[in-house]
Amino acid sequence: MISAMNFRRTCSLLAFATGLCAAQDFVWAPKKAADPYTGPHRPHTKLADLKARHANQAEWHEVIVDDDLLKSVYLQHKPGFKSRPALHPDTRAWWVVVEGEVRFNVEGTAPFVARMGSMVQVPMTTIFSYEAVGDKPVLLFETNIAKATTVFLADQAAPKMAGVDMMKMKIARRPGDYLRNNKVHTTFEELSAKLEAGTLKGTQKVVEDDRGAANFIYGYEKNLGKLNLADRGHFHTETAEYWLIMSGQIRYRIEGQEVFIAEPGDVVYVPRNRWHLARWFGAGPSTRLAMNGYPNLMHFYDPEMTVPGNK
């Protein structure tokens, strides 16, 4: 077993390279029975299966995550689609462009076109809309805080929503703040280039909100330590975690599941209290966007098996 002193020393050596390590301690953590998979949640949602399921639909949406902290939906829009100007009263929303091109109009920012790999976010009380541009469908992965509300500007007739009475109301507001490392538009190309060049290191916080986070994790299997087939990885006690695969391949070991490889566009979901280990896989670079309900998620590692940062 690794002693507390050696554990701290190992982590300090890895801290600069990974950006993941801080002071390390041994604690007694309550490992409850792993939460079951409920609702729309699956260990592995394959983009290929989603496309096959909606093959005859020009526009479609499917809920992938809907737990007590976050909600994520896959959306496909046909060319020319325009969303209504809207805002979220109390929550930050974000999108990943998986396919196609989207022109975003976000209050306080000049309009811009987001393409495959773009990560776009809008803080609370900020008006936004988007339009599918180009001649191909647009595929978006949209995330917001659980039970978030969308309100629409009253410059058009009220939208019809089943079971909802739309009421014309007056509000007082100002555009929300980005704060921390949040930016309205971040691209895969800029982050991966800086990580390759060494001007950035470790996990990059793309979305950092008190009630939600999205972390860009990029790297190569060749730079990892030798895989220990007995390593269970770690678990989380207060939030599920899930990943949108953005490039390459990711190898997953999840408690109760067979080991599998996830491909770009796939989503992998792990409920609370369930051991899991994700590793970059294959010869080239691999990227996953990790999402959960807290900006600084506590990881509980098996000290006999895993050195934090060896992911």
Image: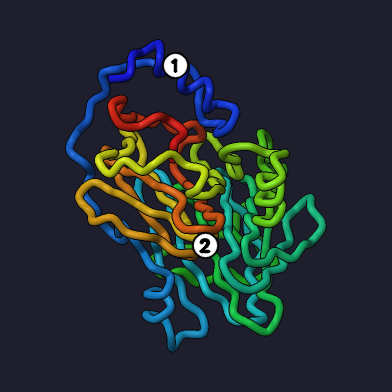
Q: Is residue 30 above or below residue 235?
A: above
Residue under numbered circle 1: 8
Q: Quadrant of residue 15?
A: top right
Q: Quadrant of the C terminus?
A: top left
Residue 158 image point, x, y percent = 58, 69
Q: Which mark is residue 161?
A: none
Side of 97 relative to 5 (left or right): right
* Disc on res. 141: 2
Q: Residue at x 51, y 35 (%)?
A: 295
Closer-to-camera residue (84/232): 232
Q: Residues within 10 Å of mark 1 (few under 14, many from 20)?
A: some
Q: Secondary structure at mark 2?
A: strand
Question: Observer-nearest residue: 173 or 19?
Answer: 19
| Position of residue 100 measured from the top left corner of the image (x, y, whole percent) | 63, 74
Q: Residue at 43% across / 85% down in the picture?
A: 55
Residue type highlighted by circle 1: Arg
Q: Closest to the observer: 191 or 310?
A: 310
